[in-house]
Amino acid sequence: MFTHSQIWSGLDKLAKSNGYSPSGLAKLAGLDPTSFNKSKRISPDGKPRWPSTESLAKVLSVTNSTMSDFVLFIEDIPSGKLSQSERKQIARDTADALIKTESVLFNASEPFTLKSGKKSPVYIDCRRLVSFVKERNKLMDHAAKLLISDIGSDNLDILAGGETAGIPYGAFISDRLNKPMIYVRKEPKGYGRMAQIEGVLPEKNDAGKKPNVILIEDLQTDGGSKKIFVKALRDAGAKVDHAFVVFHYGIFDASAKNMKELGIDLHALCTWWDVLEVAKDNNYFDDGTLKSVENFLNNPLEWQE
């Protein structure tokens, strides 16, 4: 629950972000210009006064803002780096949500067969997460905080969802950050404009430079698939230095190598190691399964043998 001071601070920041004083914002919304004055926030007998839901709805409407936008102002997302404890909590929250929604599965007795043909005691399906509103919203709030903290809102012009699983996550996060979104195909479509990038990618941003675009996908194993998307965006004139995924395997050396070669900084909410830690702490699986999964994560190739 938000405090009295947080709500008023959020309104002040909303006004400032749109170029208004609190009284100017109130006037714009058709309210008494003194409605948001600091002197009105505490009653004569010392009790806190809260803005009404009607007033809040009106200011959101005239500023073309959503409640998610307002929450970002309330929560006062730091402009600097998130603390290690905050990052750890984000990773644990993500791991717990993925387990509870069965977006990650453990099965050592009957291993999963991956697309590559290899066997694995673990499986991840981030597409499943989009159907769970409560968990999805929490993780997308975390994603917005992480990106603002690590990259900065001013360095994020456009979010690009990668076909197909990255598209919904690009939409969820762009809505929270109030940023434009595009999506990029794995290859140009074979009809119409033959476009590989859908949406509007301007030649320049407000600073007159190449637009800063971040690639959004659901997960990353070794990062090989990112090359197609990054190349398409750069060929179209975008500056692409960052990529975000909900889930990063975190067990393949090739991932860091591929990102370095691409010149991309990868941002992720959690890895298999976070999932394993949460699973252990909460006894989500039997000891034999947990041990087999841990052996796999330490050496995937040896585990195959």
Image (cartoon, helix red, strand yellow):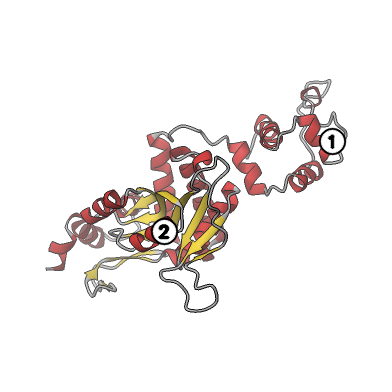
Q: Which residue is drawn at 56% across and 62% down?
A: 199
The correct choice, above or below, for 73 with respect to 160 in the image is above
Q: Give amino acid for label 1.
A: Lys
Q: Which residue is drawn at 41% across and 61% down?
A: 232
Q: Residue 61 location, x and y as percent? A: 76, 48
Q: Distance between the residues labelled 1 and 2?
A: 46 Å
Q: Is mark 2 on a helix, strand or loop?
A: helix
Mark 2, Cα crowd under 10 Å, few <14 / some 14-19 / many 20+, is few
Q: Residue 101 location, x and y as percent? A: 45, 63
Q: Which of marks 1 and 2 is nearer the N terminus?
A: 1
Residue extending farthest bottom: 191
Q: Give amino acid for label 2.
A: Asp
Q: Can residue 134 be seen in this view?
A: no
Q: How many labels does the image show?
A: 2
Q: Which of 28 and 77 lies nearest the eye of the viewer?
A: 28
In the rendered structure, are the residues bearing label 1 and label 2 in contact, judged by CB atoms less than 8 Å apart? Answer: no
State the residue position of label 1: 27
State the residue position of label 2: 235
